[in-house]
Amino acid sequence: MYIDSHCHLDDARFSDDLDAVLDRASAAGVTRILSIGTGDGPPEIDRAVRIAEKYEQVYASVGVHPHDAAKVTPQTLDDLRVLAAHPKVVAYGEIGLDYHYDFSPREVQREVFVAQLKLAADLRLPITIHTREAWDDTMSILRENWAGEGIMHCFTGDPVQAQAALDMGFHLSYGGVLTFKTAENVRESARITPDDRLLIETDAPYLAPIPHRGKRNEPSMMIETARKLAEVRGTTPDRIAAITTANFNRLCQVRGYTRVSDGN
Ligand SMILES: [Zn+2]
Ligand SMILES: [Zn+2]
């Protein structure tokens, strides 16, 4: 059994065939999925939670992606606090900084990141971090504002960055990039990540692993990343499954919640 620790099931690219996507995931052994709740940003912040209500194997996070930081109002944070009380919300995020696209002004991204770290701490939820071309600012904000646990999602840093995140207590989650030819740095980071800090994800519909690169990614494709992770670490995919599943369930305190909606 695998857990996809970061997936965007609410993406429009899954709206026509989500049942089939989840069936293929189950058939491939991906039997639990964290659906990231950031969507297209506020005011609509509950799409992942609604999916988690419908499918037993799906859990949700809540939060505002750095891309959407400029859409945040004080009301947004109040709404997120209420939504986070939902029993299937097990993480906060993805939050952080994205200086590649700069869809929101950097100053606003930093402000909203800090505000959400405070909220996540209040809620006692682990955080999932998105950082792109913003490593130093991300780490300094975390050092000043975060004492809990969390995940560096789609970790693509080098071993020095990996070690810095590990020293702060973070889990490192590896996705499809691990399989890319040019990603030797990332594979080196995956080699030095201790068993008890290792996670795996798709970030679907983005970043499909080889041999699916360029296609719509989906949770069943995570098997390719698991194989590569096993190869890099000199172990078996089964062991990768066992380690990453135990880590996710511990970090997110998932205890086999089984509520499902009665209708369709
Ligand atoms: Zn991300
Ligand atoms: Zn994501």
Image (tube, rainbow, N blue to C red):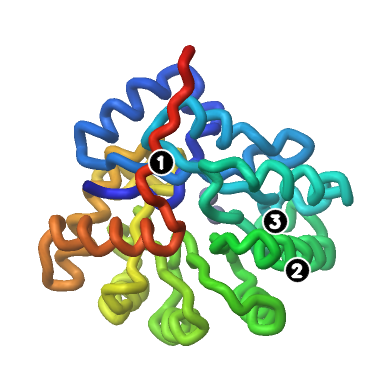
Above/below status of 66 relative to 215: below
- Above or below, 85 against 229 in this view is above
Residue 182, percent across and down?
Answer: 33, 66
Q: Distance between the residues labelled 3 and 1?
A: 30 Å
- Residue at position x 70%, y 56% in the image: 66
254 or 182, nearer to the observer: 254
Residue on which disc 3 sits: 66
Which secondary structure, mark 1?
A: loop
Q: Nearer the viewer, mark 2 or mark 1?
A: 1
Residue 114 shown left or right of residue 195 in the figure: right
Q: Which of marks 2 and 3 is nearer the N terminus?
A: 3
> Which image quadrant is residue 30 in?
top left
Residue 56 visible within the image: yes
Q: Residue at x 35, y 53 (%)?
A: 176
- Asked whether residue 99 is in view, the answer is no
> Which residue does the numbered mark 1 point to in the structure image?
257
Which structural element holds mark 2? helix
Distance (Cα) linking label 2 and label 3? 11 Å
Determine whether, in the image, residue 182 is placed left or right of residue 235. right
Residue 243, percent from left and from top: 24, 64
Q: Quick check: is the Cβ at mark 3 less than 8 Å away from ligand 1?
A: no
Q: Mark 2 points at which residue?
A: 114
Q: Please report whichever mark, 3 or 1, sits nearer to the chain's N-terminal start.
A: 3
| CA gap, disc 2 and disc 1 | 31 Å
Q: In the rendered structure, which amino acid carries the disc numbered 1?
A: Tyr
